[in-house]
Image: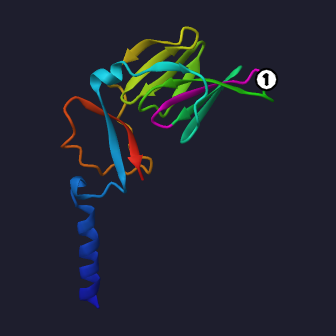
Amino acid sequence: MKKVFLLLAFVSLTGIFLRSDEMPVNGYTPVFMSREGLDNSVSYIPGAREMLRTGKIYFRTPYIFVNERYKGVHVINNSNPAHPVNEGFILAPGCIDMAVKGNILYLDNAVDLVSFDLNSKQVTKRIRNVLPEPIPPDDMSFFNLQNRPKDYIIVGWKGG
């Protein structure tokens, strides 16, 4: 009985010491974007867009901002709460969080922090490489990134 217990303990402990490149990703595959592409990826697209994988919601009268995980932010005019209007979408690959102060929407664009002017609908500032890369939706980060393309950044995950 003691030998069986020791064998089980050994098998359990060796699983802890597996290298991360030997661990499964649970079906998620990273979506990469070049650094140059990321620098030019934030833009405003007028009109409604279907909401598929929503995340955080931020309210600032009269607007509601709804995050579309890893894609960007829906802009909904809620001037008439009985009939909200989906006015547009701020495309921002890798976006999972946002905040608003005054007329500036602050959002993550993968590893960058971006200031977006809601009046002019333009990026006013970008601070590069201040955030960690997005992790898979299930918070499992056991993906071997040694073979990633040079100068590419994870902006999302597909599969799962």
Point out residue 34 in the picture as x, y percentages from the top left corner: 28, 27
Near-viewer residue (89 or 58): 89
Near-viewer residue (11 or 104): 104
Identify the coloring.
Answer: rainbow
Q: Which residue is drawn at 36% across and 29% down?
A: 111
Q: What stretch is highlighted in magenta?
A: 69-80
Of the 4 image quadrants, the one containing the N terminus is bottom left
As drawn, is 72 to the left or to the right of 21?
right
Near-viewer residue (139 or 27): 27
Q: On screen, 120 above or below 107?
A: above
Point out residue 28 in the picture as x, y percentages from the top left corner: 37, 50
As drawn, is 64 to the left or to the right of 155?
right
Q: Residue at x 32, y 23 (%)?
A: 37
Residue 149 picture quarter = top left
As drawn, is 135 to the left or to the right of 89?
left
Point out residue 84 in the picture as x, y percentages from the top left corner: 73, 27
Q: On screen, 17 above or below 109?
A: below
Q: Which residue is drawn at 33% across and 54% down?
A: 25
Residue at the farthest bottom position: 1
Q: Residue at x 34, y 19 (%)?
A: 39
Q: What element carries label 1?
A: loop
Specify whether residue 72 is painted magenta: yes
Specify whether residue 45 is painted magenta: no
Point out residue 143 in the picture as x, y percentages from the top left corner: 28, 49
- Residue 8 appearing in the image: yes
Mark 1 crowd level (few <14, some 14–19, many ≥20, 10 Å Cα): few
Residue under label 1, please give it.
Answer: 80
